[in-house]
Amino acid sequence: MTIRIEGTVAPGFESVADAFAQSFEGRPGMGASLAIRLEGQTVARLWGGTADARSGRPWTVDTPSVIFSCTKGLMSLAVAQLVEQGLVDYDAPVSRYWPEFAAAGKADISVREAMAHRAGLLAPRIDLTLDDIVDWERMVGVLAEQEPLFEPDSGYAYHSLTHGWLTGEIVRRVTGLSPGAYFARNIAAPVGAEVWIGQPERIEQVAHLEVIPPAPAPAEGPPPPNPDWPLRAATLGAALPPTLVTETGGFNDPRLHRAEIPGAGGIATAEGLATVWSAAVTETEGVRLVGPDVVEQATRVVSEGPGIYPGPGPYYRWGMGFMLDAEARRLLSPRSFGHDGAGGQVAFADPEHKVGFAYLTNRMESPPDPRGNGVVTALRTILNR
């Protein structure tokens, strides 16, 4: 079955369109979208396939989709704005802005450590439910009260979901706005981007997500810790399925779409997401969201390598919440920063080429995933000619 690809690319970017079309091969029922902005101008805007395989609803130019951990990159951009305004200091303790966070031996944990996955709060010690995770006060209360799972700054462990409540509460305490409201007012609205942390009532027809189970693989390395904290980091106990998605549950649940879950619950169109990242490195729609000095500060490597709970490589690298170019996730250049998301989402900015990039799909596959990577490779080849 041939998938009809719609949209346009600028002259010279035809190989990007070819790579996008190739990402559909052998994947019936998949939907996806791609947007790339170069020096503020759109050079690729493509979409195709199916937004909901149950009904056959097609993916259109304005289909929004859950972006999973790409949301962490957006929250890191929000904190970077506050750093630039002098309202937040990366080296200050989180408790300066959020006094209750000092409980249980956490008084000295810095914003830097919290943002770079070094706070030891990757998972709750108690089982949480769906009702808990859609309740902002409940979630930040749990994190404020909890003792770290490992000595803070002794290493890092990926805070799959809790990262968003940590950064989001800093934003809320400093600005008086919920993270979704701050993002809407100060990042999305200035550039006219269709990106939300907490789905507005007027936005309907979010793409339906489908999980493709990975092929079984032989066990490698030591057995997981008991409790398996990295797994609990994704499930939060009983709140979410290990796959993050079921037919009608997990991140297919409208309750999660409406809630502000800034570690993984963002919703966006590819065009909106690429526009935000473009405005992080170059004037876009007349706006530059954050200046080069704070970008340079926020994208220095803080965490890399195997981490506290190492699995088999390759490994990722992080700065101040931003995912950086690494062996496990090749971006456009060594200066690229942003964040990927579960199932195949890729979104980032590149200051060297002044690019904003977003690839979104509703067919969730396990890494290594050639789809978004293939498009990034095609774009790199074009820009490095």
Image (cartoon, helix red, strand yellow):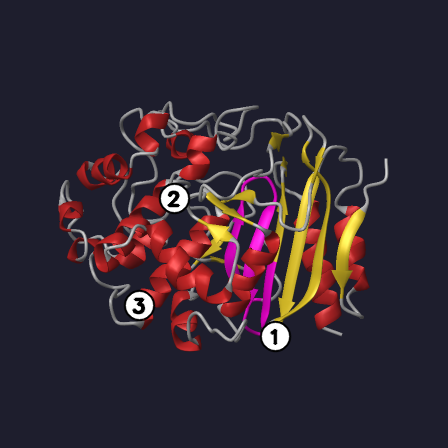
Left or right: residue 352 versus residue 143 is right
Q: Nearer the viewer, residue 354 or 173?
A: 173
Give the residue drawn at x 67%, y 26%: 54
Left or right: residue 18 versus residue 316 is right
| Residue 23 sits inside the magenta stretch | no
Q: Secondary structure at mark 1?
A: loop
Give the residue drawn at x 20%, y 57%: 93
Labelled pair 1, 2 in contact (Cβ < 8 Å): no
Q: Quadrant of the N terminus?
A: top right
Give the residue drawn at x 52%, y 31%: 252
Instruction: Of the two numbered discs 3 and 2 on the same chain, state the one appearing first in sequence.
Output: 3
Q: Which mark is residue 157?
A: 2
Q: Nearer the viewer, residue 368 or 162?
A: 162
Would you identify the image quadrant in which residue 333 lies?
Answer: bottom right
Type of amino acid at the residue the image marks with label 1: Glu
Type of amino acid at the residue the image marks with label 3: Val
Type of amino acid at the residue the image marks with label 2: Ala
Instruction: Of the two numbered discs 1 and 2 on the same chain, state the one appearing first in sequence.
Output: 1
Residue at the spot of label 1 = 39
Labelled pair 3, 2 in contact (Cβ < 8 Å): no
Graded by Cα atoms within 10 Å as few (under 14), some (14 to 19) or many (20 or more), the crowding at tag 2 reads many
Q: Nearer the viewer, residue 264 or 256?
A: 256
Residue depth check, mark 3 versus mark 2: number of the one nearer the observer: 3
Figure check: 9 above or below 115 = below
Q: Nearer the viewer, residue 340 or 249?
A: 249
| Residue 353 sits inside the magenta stretch | yes
Q: Which mark is residue 83?
A: 3
x and y percentages locating residue 132 in the rendered image? 30, 29
| Residues rendered magenta in the picture | 334-357
Graded by Cα atoms within 10 Å as few (under 14), some (14 to 19) or many (20 or more), the crowding at tag 1 reads some
Q: CA distance from mark 1 to mark 2?
A: 35 Å
